[in-house]
Image (cartoon, rainbow, N blue to C red):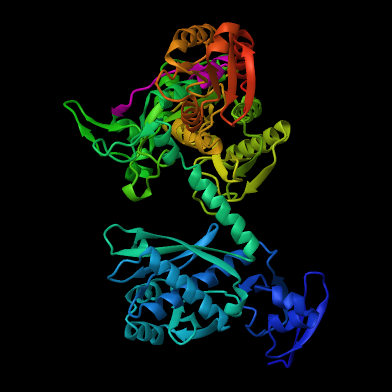
Amino acid sequence: MSSTYSITLPDGSIKVVSAGSTSLDVARSIGQRLADDAVAAKVNGELIDLTRPFDSDSTLELLTSKSPEALEIYRHSTAHLLAAAVLELYPGTKLGIGPPIKDGFYYDFDRPSPFTPDDLEKIEQRMREIRDRDLPYERRLVAKPEGLKKYEELGEPMKCELISERAGDIFSEYTLGPQFIDFCRGPHVPSTKRIKAFKLLSIAGAYWKGDEKRQQLQRIYGTAWFSQKDLDEHLHKLEEAKRRDHRLLGKQLDLISIQELAGPGLIFFHPKGALVRKMLEDWMREQYLRRGYSLVNTPHVMRESLWEVSGHLSHYADNMYAAIELDDARYRLKPMNCPGHILIYRDKQHSYRDLPVRLGELGTVYRYERSGTLHGLFRVRGFTQDDAHIFCRPDQIEDEIVNCLEFAVDVLKTYGFHRYKAEISVWDGGKSGKYDGTPEQWALAEKALHRAVERVGLEATVMADEAAFYGPKIDVKLLDALDRPWQLSTVQFDFTLPRRFELEYTGEDGAKHQPLMVHRALYGSVERFFGILLEHYAGAFPTWLAPVQAIVLPIADRHLDYAKTVQTQLEAAGLRVEIDARSEKVNYKIREAQLQKIPFMLVVGDREAADGKVAVRTRKGGDLGARAVAEVVADIAKLVADKAPTE
């Protein structure tokens, strides 16, 4: 074994270190500030602990709080800190898993008594106490038989199961103090003192390995950040997200509900919610027609044999509802609209002159989702997709993709979203054999996607080996008012279904050719898009989308007749108007209207009735004073016509 090693840093400089030296030693040799900020190391491309000794000449990258991977390692270490605190406070608790996740971490525990909110406070306090002990995260290597015996003696059956399934002949484990030991690949921060800012957030139930047939565990969620400032900002965002929760707003504003008698994951749109939904759907259908799409409708239930041909029964059966036995055949609720559109295309012969054929539908589909995964409007069992399928020639494909992307951008801008990006998911070049289609088809499709993105001017990231097995795709993601990304529009090639259904068109050469097929959804689903809008605007829909655009508030009963006159004038301009005729004080009516997020409140009393005016207030608390009714009508109508995002 060499007595020294050459360590190459990212800038090309070389540090010569003695045997037994660690990445942390190298960091200290550069500067104590760097050593204090370092979280882990990347040695020869592998993420490792700062305290693991070098065993050869190596390349070294020190990961600090500015490194993309560092926060995940930091949160993983905080999850271990959580588990150590639980074991100190509640001896005998069995350990599940504790990974980092987006914006935080969790750990699963098995214990007979449920954790309570008070327990979370105690656990968090104990985490701080352990943190202040400056305990090291010590890595040990253990032979598999020895490790299994150890965890059996510790009474950790879930760890034994994981070791049996995942561990090699030698595996790593980490200790944290005298009571906590965990089968873990790491890496971790050097010691608990590195963990500065964390917060436990909630308790939830979780089945072991996500299997409903296994035991239910208790999952504690938390978040961790490199500074208290970052933590405070995140907690503020969480509070704002709670305030904007579409499930809460949907109930408060009387827009939607989920009825227990009907079943979970099934959305009921109330009159106001249905009105907003109608506007979403009407706008999309109008755009279809303007952009050369033909509107179609397909059945909600079709023979099972159709889904055999499409391949859904072999690839997607777990997400489909069980067959319905009828007198002539077995039927299935449709999980997708595409086979229906294919049957319409296939119903007649097509010439190259007919293409492209663009078929669009707001079609309701049904997919089985486990009850534990359902989430308001975002994860449901029945939903409506703004689905379209384009059948075209190879020479048309790039222009068709450009049109789809321009359409997607118009959707975002129309509804007030101005921050978005694209991801292009491509195949692995055929290395794995898991992708359908020929290399020529993939090359044509991917080139068309890249060229289309350039032509539209979208910022795009290439996602290698992330395509669907049947073709590459572009996903457009938006950022909402809280900087949360949402997957929205998808433009997806499909090499499989045209082949399965033997689709054809007659080419200019008189021969039969297979058309290219593109799936395209821009809202994603009407339900999910509705929920995104609801949270983005915190329930205060833009005036053009607001279910009630103005409300007339008579000060006293004697002003009711004039209030009706005002209502009639606004309705004549196509505006949605209500009157609050209750015998309540006008300030109470104003507060109620603001809680209902109504854009404009028009107060009428003796003076307004005499002058033919209304006293205008906005839902944001603005008092615009007394104005002529015709002027108010014109201003609101302009906001509607312009689809202005704010009033």
The answer to which quarter of the image holds residue 438 is: top right
Side (left or right) of 623 relative to 160 = right
The C terminus is located in which quarter? top right
Report the residue at 59% width, 80% height from top: 191
Q: Position of residue 518 (x, y in %)?
A: 54, 30
The N terminus is located in which quarter? bottom right
Q: Position of residue 541 (x, y in %)?
A: 54, 29
As drawn, 348 above or below 335: above
Q: Observer-nearest residue: 394 or 619?
A: 619
Kindly give the residue lying farthest to the left in the view shown.
327
Side (left or right) of 246 relative to 639 = left
Q: Position of residue 564 (x, y in %)?
A: 46, 9
The answer to which quarter of the image holds residue 335 is: top left
**Residue 298 in magenta?**
yes
**Residue 46 in magenta?**
no
Tag count: 0
Side (left or right) of 235 relative to 63 = left
As drawn, 280 above or below 485: above
As drawn, 176 above or below 626: below
Q: Position of residue 261 (x, y in %)?
A: 23, 37
Q: Is residue 230 visible?
A: yes
Side (left or right) of 496 relative to 24 = left
Q: Is residue 506 visible?
A: no
Q: Observer-nearest residue: 87 or 607?
A: 607
Q: Observer-nearest residue: 108 or 437?
A: 108
The answer to which quarter of the image holds residue 44 is: bottom right
Magenta segment range?
Answer: 282-302
